[in-house]
Image: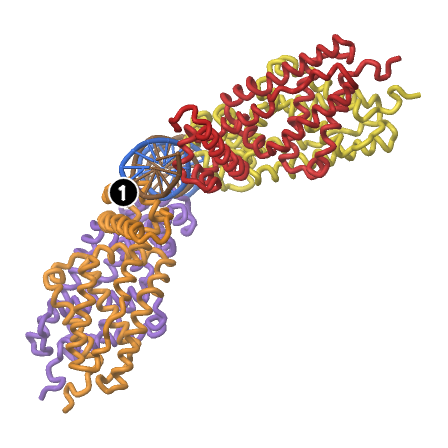
Chain colours: A purple, B orange, C red, D yellow, E brown, F blue
DNA sequence: CATGAATGAGGATTCATTCAT
DNA sequence: TATGAATGAATCCTCATTCAT
């Protein structure tokens, strides 16, 4: 592990190397699965020696945690919900969900494939992911839903389950796409709006059929 | 492998033994993950010797395929859609989806957890599962949606994506529950109706706001 | 193991079953090698159940010893050397060696292939085979050679090595044939006389070019 | 497997390690037989870890092929037959055969014991050995015999079978010695000349008793 | 005696991890 | 820091052998 502290150039280098390894790990894990993939394959894919991995990660599992952290950082990047009150809520949500999907596309489905697989296999990782990613997202989303409901923008019956339904739908669609569904692959750009439409029907925006 | 052919009692015995092993495998795999679990642990859980497993399954992977087949058999059991025309479509669908969820509960979430995890990790298994379970289900569902649309029972915009959205939602909710979401666990009995409601909003039953 | 003692019909049956198993073992062992062959394969080849083998042989190794005993019985069947003195020694030896080769052909090369292979691999079996088959043969042959020499039929320089040379030649030719040499296979019937000719040259029959 | 290419020192090291392992394998296989010997025993005998074997050989069978290749290299090393024309053919052949026997002694009987045993057990290895070692040797020997016959040095009846007889004799004597024959062991140094004498009798050098 | 399912010891092989260079 | 050879624990699987039916 690097020792010189606070050398910004060193830091940059280390970070770059870590990312280089994580990129390689993502590809290899996505292709062969975490357990079937060997550290040698990851090293080869990264163009480095096997031992070098251990200068940047404590062990193989740490590679997985590294991927999970990448998702964390990207997913939980604070969003600007402030403008929610202004303008049409449907437009706002469309923009918001589209952005999330773009982030997803940017990260690559492979990362999710790899992380989800291990999450389902490992109860500790499962708990970790739920606490670090899922739950915070749900809490934030719930807050906004409640606020909108209080502000009378939407009529909301059950924010708890609503949020989980939306989240589940997103998650499920991602998995179906990972599984190779050709329709979802071809029309993936339509999916965000589809989700929002269903979402808004569910939450029944006030005034839709009102007046 | 047992050889005496066409002895129905023998067949029953073999089937029972196979199920005994698959039950044990489900528990062990769900707890430790497929790869971290050892055949010895499965044997211990089943109360048999390690070698006995190999009298009934070719290898460890075959255990996984055995679990997948169990899902196949249960999931693809032909349903009685015939009554669809009669009575209220909402009631029919509610009953249908509820039944599917009961089947799921009966199979146990562990099976899905195990199978899904490996499906995400193994591209061959992924293709197999998609072709054997997902696609057939989608095709059947699409047919019914189209028929209902033709019969004027519902107004349907996009059966392809609609079916995938519903399927994805179901899948995603299952995964969120597997991940330990306490709300979904506590109110799992409400979920089927929730799904149907969203589903029916999407497909817009004719005459909902009509008259 | 059979218990009724001295029942000749039983004995015959037991013997037949043993031979049935040994025949199967010979074929299977010759094809796959002793260690690679499984008792299940032997049982299948013999058309019996795996367990039945153990009613007639203590274990897998005993099958090998059974094959070795078969060779013993056939090889060491007392020969009629008595006529040696009378008639031409070359004719006598030709007849004798031809008979040995016929015995060999009758037993089948497979048996030798199997037994020799294990003999080379296992020092205990090696010693056993040497003491039970090779050495007695050599001793008998030596005796005859010496007697012939004393009787003035042949002029013999070194009976010890001569006998070993002849024996080695026979053994080596068998092995070359087992290895699939096409010439030896095609002209195997010429081989006995060839051996005898070399043999007689070596021992230099008195009067060959004498007087 | 070591990868740095074209580093001659590295190459030497790798070769040395391979030989170290093959030497250990020879001893262990000769003592317990190929199948009864474990890779652990080979590793212990070589003074390395079990896994290290697999850095140099693909699997246990590859160790055997390594031994066979050693024989190949030594056996097929081009010999200097050129001097054949000059000098006495008997002297030349004596020198030649003696040299072959010395090579054999140098390689060690154990290697032959091990390789021959498996050759007899495995039809693929058998074919390989015949094609790579036996047949080439026979072809070369035949060529020399024919040339000598044409040059009138010897009178040759049947080069094909003659060569096989000589080869078989050599092979058989080796096996008898491996089997522990005390006479052959004690007088092994006499054996080459013995073989040559028989050989030359068979091919009947022109002018032996001629004129 | 015949059967063949159950057994479990044994062994080849893999691969994450270490560490001397 | 980078390397990659060495390590050896861990595990899937085979198969000779047993024994209840």
- Which subunit holds the residue at mark 1? B
**For residue D131, above or below residue C175:** below
Name the residue carrying label 1: B43
Q: Position of residue B120 (x, y in %)?
A: 31, 58
Toward the left, the furthest residue is A150
Name of the residue lying farthest toward the bottom? B211
Asked if residue D62 can be seen in this view, the reply is no
Pinpoint residue A138: horizontal percent, then vertical percent.
15, 64
The kind of secondary structure element at disc 1 is helix
Q: Where the N terminus of chain A falls, by quadrant?
A: top left
Q: Position of residue A23 (x, y in %)?
A: 36, 55
Q: Quadrant of residue B105?
A: bottom left
Q: Position of residue C123 (x, y in %)?
A: 51, 22
Q: Is residue C112 left or right of residue A11?
A: right
Q: Residue at x 49, y 26 (%)?
A: C65
Q: Residue at x 25, y 69 (%)?
A: B167
């Amino acid at each position: 592990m690097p020792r010189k502290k606070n050398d910004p150039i060193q830091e940059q280098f280390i970070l770059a190397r870590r990312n280089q390894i994580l990129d390689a790990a993502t590809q290899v894990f996505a292709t062969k699965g975490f357990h079937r993939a060997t550290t040698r394959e990851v090293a080869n894919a990264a163009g480095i020696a096997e031992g070098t991995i251990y200068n940047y990660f404590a062990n193989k599992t740490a590679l997985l945690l590294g991927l999970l952290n990448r998702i964390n950082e990207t997913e939980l990047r604070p969003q600007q919900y402030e403008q929610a009150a202004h303008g049409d809520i449907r437009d706002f949500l469309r923009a918001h969900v589209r952005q999330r999907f773009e982030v997803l596309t940017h990260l690559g489905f492979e990362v999710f494939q790899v992380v989800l697989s291990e999450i389902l296999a490992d109860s500790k990782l499962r708990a970790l992911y739920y606490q670090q990613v899922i739950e915070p997202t749900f809490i934030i989303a719930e807050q906004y839903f409640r606020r909108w409901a209080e502000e009378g923008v939407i009529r909301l019956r059950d924010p708890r389950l609503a949020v989980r339904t939306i989240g589940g739908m997103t998650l499920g669609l991602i998995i179906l796409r990972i599984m190779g569904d050709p329709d979802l692959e071809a029309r993936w750009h339509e999916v965000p709006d589809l989700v929002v439409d269903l979402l808004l029907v569910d939450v029944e925006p006030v005034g839709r059929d009102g007046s």
